[in-house]
């Protein structure tokens, strides 16, 4: 590159040139040089260097004028800040390029346009600050980008506007917060040929889970049209998650798809002088996924290539934040930006903060929900900014600790956002501006709520919880909660494997850093109830029921999927796969569905297929459903989902478990049904566990053991059936105790028999989670593993350590 040049080709820049071209441009140039040969497509362009920016200031005598304006007032005051920033931007926009600079810029522009008419080719004019994308500060969204710019004069104007954007009120405030000198930062500009995503698709991708910091996931957000609306948070995009380790091995490991509303799209302007415009997304497009599987996997492979390259370049793991676009004319995929992720990659994963809400009646206080950003809880007063224009932001009396509620956030609002204890928006996804700033500020945010500005009133006290999975919840009033901090390095080493009980896939990544030896219980019921949201048989047979309302509901649910069966299989497989990926290669024991008739009845469409039972707790549930002609077709979809997770996605750490199986004959009938739908014990390494929760499982343990790979004790139902009480009845609740001698005797007998028969035996009931002394009893009996809820993991490990130490002492005394 030229040592003091004003303009250079994009491919001439490299990662060592940040002082000259800024972080964004240095990254683009580096990728053009090194990654384009590996197939990663990047649009060509040219760079106006920071040398040009500083020379422009000098040529127009702006240095001292800007300095004087910044020093003339208290820029901590919002009104003063806005006034100062406006004065500086006006000065810059009124400046003129020297003849030499203008000539160099236009020569590079004409070279890029080539033989085309300059009015027929659109360009993106992107700012790139020299302090941008640093390891400790992202500067994301601080400077401006201009899209579909055409013609020489418009290019020159856009470049000056980029220079001016270094002095927006948000950028000035950001630099003040991070103690960066305003004249220590230069501004470079990239003029890059536009990808015609106005007719295609665009979005962002992270090579790390943006909420939990789980490093083995790629998170992709996408929508139709130019990508600015996703970054701004103006729409709710589609979301896809891909599991990196198995993608590297060639598996199509898409483990999550969520259909976004994609309410609007940005396209090229249709009026004279209008670069871009925003239109409503046609219903046919908003109701389907914007990327197909082939595109998702191609993009994910490119993200891995980019991450691997920067990791090698930096000598340490470097997760990436990537912007991408699909050209709607050529169908080609392009990477248009890439920068290091600067939030989770800098966090110390050893320190775990857990939040537990103490209000048992909190479900009655839910006001609205959305997409959770972060994992914290905050309470405060609502400040509803509905209808507020960004030029009015300095006029509001936004107090520290207020909760910001708005349609969507704007980078110009960052000086106010710094005061907020939480942020709530109607629109946006996990990669929008509000989400990025909230993570950087360390405050919880809930985005994509749809109607928050209509429901929440200024002055209303609420609680914002992002500590309950991917769904963020807004509660009325102040919710009591306990905050506990743990250091994983402080956990003692133990011999007994401790696993996790994971109900919701939403929390799987969050607990992936815990030293658990896998998942002892993943319940399908949670996924069916919360993700699929329909009775399986109603899904398959609704057209025969003459229930127009139910059919309309199912049509809405299954939008974007090939058919109803595909919807069930894919949604269930995604939920299972997300849990399996979080703990791979450790075993994840997935229990087939175990709804009872009253629970299934209450699901949409359930009334058409569920009988009335006096005591559903011991009725038609678990294994007895799977081979029944009345239900087996629905069970077949569960088998197909497991098959997809194991064979297609490659997550062969999934083990299946059969619940509430009363006889050996029944077990064999379940096996026969499984085989009909593609699952067979032992084939491709498939293991099958039996949920030991019926007394017959213990009494006939030797016979059952001949047909299974392991037992998992369900202490809840085992206690119920050994003591002969209904655990749903409050009248006998005082008698319910897993530590009853009769229950413990049954457990002891099962452990002995399992060891005799050389099959594994663990426990996944609630007992070890609730009672550390019960966990100690299990260790003394020689249990192979104990599976507990995440909130009980720490205390259970501590309790196990105590009893293991005692056992060592006893052995030493006897010896």
Image (spheres, rainbow, N blue to C red):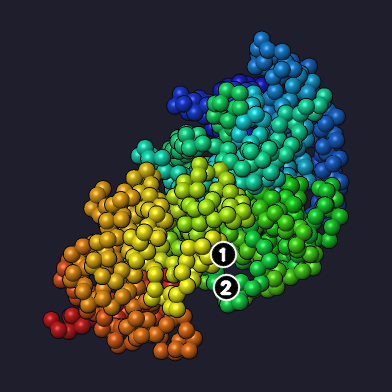
Q: Determine contact: label 2, label 1, CB under 8 Å.
A: yes
Left or right: 343 as drawn, with respect to 637? right
The disc placed on residue 467 is 1
Q: Judging from the image, what secondary structure is the residue with disc 2 in?
A: strand
Query: Depth check: 215 or 342 in front?
Result: 215
Query: Depth check: 792 or 391 in front?
Result: 792
Residue drawn at (70%, 73%) of the image: 477
Q: Position of residue 481 (x, y in %)?
A: 59, 74
The disc placed on residue 136 is none
Question: Height in image: 26 above or below 152?
Answer: below
Residue placed farthest to the left in the image? 815
Left or right: 260 as drawn, with respect to 389? left
Visible residue check, residue 247: yes
Residue drawn at (70%, 40%) of the image: 264
Q: Which residue matches tag 2?
A: 357
Left or right: 407 as drawn, with respect to 46? right
Locate the C terminus and report the quarter of the image it occupies: bottom left
Q: Position of residue 440 (x, y in %)?
A: 62, 53
Q: Position of residue 792 (x, y in %)?
A: 43, 73
Specify the quadrant of the image occupied by residue 717: bottom left
Instruction: Report the number of numbered marks.
Output: 2
Residue drawn at (40%, 60%) of the image: 630
Label 2 environment density (alpha carbons within 10 Å; few <14, some 14–19, many ≥20) = some
């Amino acid at each position: 590159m030229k040592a003091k040049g004003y303009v250079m080709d994009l491919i001439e820049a490299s990662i060592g040139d940040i002082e000259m071209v800024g972080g964004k441009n240095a990254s683009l140039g580096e990728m053009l040089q090194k990654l384009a040969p590996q197939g990663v497509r990047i649009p060509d362009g040219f760079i106006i260097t920071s040398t040009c920016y500083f020379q422009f200031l000098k040529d127009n005598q702006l240095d001292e004028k800007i300095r004087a304006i910044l020093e003339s007032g208290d820029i901590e005051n919002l009104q003063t800040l806005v006034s100062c920033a406006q004065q500086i931007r006006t000065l810059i926009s009124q400046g003129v390029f020297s003849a030499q600079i203008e000539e160099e810029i236009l020569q590079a522009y004409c070279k890029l346009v080539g033989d085309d008419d300059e009015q027929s080719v659109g360009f993106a004019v992107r700012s790139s600050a020299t302090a941008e994308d640093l390891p400790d500060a992202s500067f994301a969204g601080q400077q401006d980008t201009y899209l579909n710019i055409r013609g020489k004069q418009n290019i020159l104007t856009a470049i000056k506007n980029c220079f001016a954007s270094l002095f927006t009120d948000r950028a000035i405030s950001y630099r003040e917060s991070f103690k960066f000198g305003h004249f220590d930062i230069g501004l470079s500009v990239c003029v890059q040929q536009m990808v015609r995503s106005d007719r295609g698709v665009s979005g962002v991708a992270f090579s790390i889970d943006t909420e939990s910091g789980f490093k083995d996931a790629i998170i992709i957000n996408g929508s139709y049209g130019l990508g600015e609306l996703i970054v701004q948070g103006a729409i709710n995009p589609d979301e896809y998650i891909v599991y990196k380790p198995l993608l590297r091995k060639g598996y199509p490991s898409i483990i999550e798809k969520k259909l976004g509303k994609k309410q609007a799209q940005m396209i090229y302007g249709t009026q004279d002088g209008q670069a871009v415009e925003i239109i409503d997304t046609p219903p046919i497009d908003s109701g389907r996924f914007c990327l197909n599987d082939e595109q998702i996997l191609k993009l994910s492979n490119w993200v891995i290539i980019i991450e691997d390259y920067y990791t090698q370049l930096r000598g340490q793991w470097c997760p990436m934040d990537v912007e991408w676009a699909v050209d709607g004319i050529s169908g080609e995929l392009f990477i248009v930006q890439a920068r290091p992720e600067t939030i989770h990659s800098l966090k110390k994963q050893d320190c775990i903060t857990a939040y537990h809400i103490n209000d048992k009646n909190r479900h009655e206080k839910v006001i609205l929900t959305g997409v959770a950003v972060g994992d914290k809880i905050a309470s405060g007063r609502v400040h509803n900014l509905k209808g507020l224009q960004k030029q009015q932001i300095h006029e509001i009396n936004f107090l520290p600790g207020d909760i910001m509620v708005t349609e969507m956030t704007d980078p110009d609002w960052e000086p106010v956002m710094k005061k907020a204890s939480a942020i709530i928006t109607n629109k946006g996804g996990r990669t929008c501006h509000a989400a990025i700033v909230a993570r950087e500020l360390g405050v919880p945010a809930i985005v994509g709520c749809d109607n928050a500005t209509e429901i929440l009133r200024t002055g209303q006290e609420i609680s914002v919880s992002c500590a309950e999975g991917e769904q963020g919840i807004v509660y009325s009033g102040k919710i009591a909660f306990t905050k506990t901090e743990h250091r994983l390095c402080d956990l003692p080493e133990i011999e007994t494997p401790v696993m996790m009980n994971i109900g919701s896939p939403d929390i799987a990544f969050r607990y992936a850093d815990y030293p658990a030896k896998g998942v002892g219980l993943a319940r399908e019921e949670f996924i069916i109830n919360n993700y699929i949201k329909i009775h399986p048989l109603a899904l398959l047979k609704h057209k025969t029921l003459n229930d127009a309302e139910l059919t309309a509901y199912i049509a809405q649910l299954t939008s974007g999927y090939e058919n109803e069966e595909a919807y069930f299989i894919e949604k269930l497989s995604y939920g299972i796969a997300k849990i399996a990926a979080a703990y791979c290669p450790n075993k994840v024991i997935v229990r087939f569905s175990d709804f009872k008739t009253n629970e299934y009845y209450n699901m949409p469409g359930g009334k058409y297929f569920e009988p009335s039972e006096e005591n559903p707790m011991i009725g038609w549930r678990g294994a007895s459903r799977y081979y029944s002609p009345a239900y087996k077709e629905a069970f077949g979809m569960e088998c197909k989902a497991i098959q997809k997770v194991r064979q297609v996605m490659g997550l062969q750490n999934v083990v299946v478990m059969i619940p509430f199986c009363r006889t050996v004959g029944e077990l064999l009938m379940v096996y026969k049904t499984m085989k009909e739908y593609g699952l067979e014990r032992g084939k491709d390494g498939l293991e099958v566990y039996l949920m030991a929760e019926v007394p017959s499982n213990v009494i006939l343990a030797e016979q059952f053991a001949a047909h299974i790979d392991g037992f998992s004790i369900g202490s809840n139902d085992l206690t119920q059936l050994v003591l002969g009480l209904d655990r749903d009845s409050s009248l006998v609740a005082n008698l319910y105790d897993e530590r009853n001698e009769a229950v413990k005797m049954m457990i002891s007998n099962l452990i002995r028999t399992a060891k005799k028969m050389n099959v594994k035996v663990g426990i996944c009931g609630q007992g070890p989670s609730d009672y550390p002394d019960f966990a100690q009893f299990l260790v003394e009996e020689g249990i192979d593993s104990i599976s507990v809820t995440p909130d009980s993991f720490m205390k259970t490990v501590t309790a196990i350590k105590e009893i293991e130490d005692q056992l060592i002492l006893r052995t030493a005394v006897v010896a």
